[in-house]
Amino acid sequence: MSETPTNTLQYRLDGREDAPVLVLGPSLGTTWHMWDRQIPELTRDWRVVRFDLPGHGGAPAEPFTSVAELGDRLLATLDAIGVQRFGYAGCSLGGAVGLDLALRAPHRVASLALVAASPRFGTADEFRQRGVIVRANGLEPMARTAPEQWFTSLFAGAQPAIVDWAVQMVRTTDPACYIAACEALAVFDVREALDRIGIPALVLVGSEDQVTGPAEARTLVAGIADARLAVVPGASHLAPVEQPAAVTDLLIEHFAGTAPDTSGPLTVPPLPAGPVPAAEPAPAAEPTEAGRPDPYEKGLGLRREVLGDAHVDQALAGDPGGAFQDLVTRYAWGEVWSRDGLDRRTRSVVTLTALIAGGHREALADHTRAALRNGLSAEELREIVLHAGVYCGFPAAETALRVVARVVEEETTPPA
């Protein structure tokens, strides 16, 4: 195991030192051991690099803020061990890293395998809600539901030791790093950039995967010019664990003949024109008459991050003319909430206090949900209400306490 500075990742090397390099990326909640059953075959021809996500498998708990930042840490790790070009296979979040590298560093990646991956993982609301649940309850709810997310019921029933291993991987993950990964996946979206990937790609998916299944895999194949689809029968999300032989054979077949040339200096070709999206695509802001960017688009993006897509969509739909919602989005979110003077947690505290004082119950419920997304705990929310009671009146605080308690219960109770 390597010593790991904060800008690199914990990694492991297997195979001959003179062999071409293949990098294997893990799924959220797993460690590099998810690839253990591929190693004997892959190391016959490859020098295999496996890495752990921050806070996973005993790795330093240094949360990352985006998939691109995780990709940068991986490249820094490979630089530190002298790897220039490499093949890359990643599962789920590891697959997102592969897509990011294929877009931002195509000169480094010789060939790509995307396992249980997607250009867009669910919705932003789903991942932010997962972060709220982990912040309130720890990782036990995620650990408890991991087997049904990762494996078919047939496999889980026949392999209790592997199921126990999977549960323990999640339980021993650092919660803050898990939440940060959820936040990074909430804004990961490269759907509009897939046609710019020119690297040969294998898109591999379990036939029974209910997380990122065959539909998401076909989206990748349709978007990437040189991609082929492989559906593994009898496998769910962690296909490398559930069907190791089939996955290994597909990887060997795909990477054969694409071994990177590691001799000589690394040549960096010009990147494709245009920016690579690192988050949900949004229209460019139109300049105002004064030359400043229109705050509407900035406000709309921030409003969606804080309040959630469902809430914002409902609010916009309820204002047919759009004038009131335009005002709210432009000034409350594009001008005030987006200022640098206070962080989002502090702005949530101020907002909640004002809503308690004004007796605005519905808005208080909405902003209690927002406060949980912004990192406030249930205990902190109760303290805010208690403190506000002294200055806003105890009747107002008593009503607020009921609203806050109801929302906290709804938002932090794990799915059955």
Image (spheres, rainbow, N blue to C red):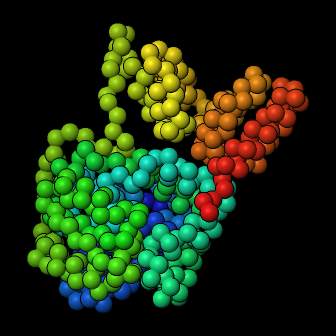
Q: Quadrant of residue 244?
A: bottom left
Q: Position of residue 255 (x, y in %)?
A: 17, 75
Residue farthest top in this picture? 289
Q: Is residue 136 left or right of residue 224?
A: right
Residue lying at 23% horizontally and 47% vertically, measured from the top left? 193
Q: Quadrant of residue 371?
A: top right
Quadrant location of the N terminus in the rendered image: bottom left
Q: Position of residue 330 (x, y in %)?
A: 48, 20
Residue 51 in view, yes or no: no
Residue 371 in view, yes or no: yes
Q: Quadrant of residue 11?
A: bottom left
Q: Position of residue 320 (x, y in %)?
A: 45, 19
Q: Is residue 365 left or right of residue 161?
A: right
Numbered label tally: 0
Residue lying at 57% horizontally and 54% vertically, measured from the top left? 131
Residue lying at 24% horizontally and 59% vertically, measured from the top left? 218
Quadrant location of the C terminus in the rendered image: bottom right
Residue lying at 22% horizontally and 78% vertically, measured from the top left? 250
Residue 369, above or below 251:
above
Q: Position of residue 340 (x, y in %)?
A: 54, 30
Q: Decide which of 197, 212 is in the foreground and name it.
A: 212
Residue 204, above or below 183:
below
Residue 405, above or below 357:
below
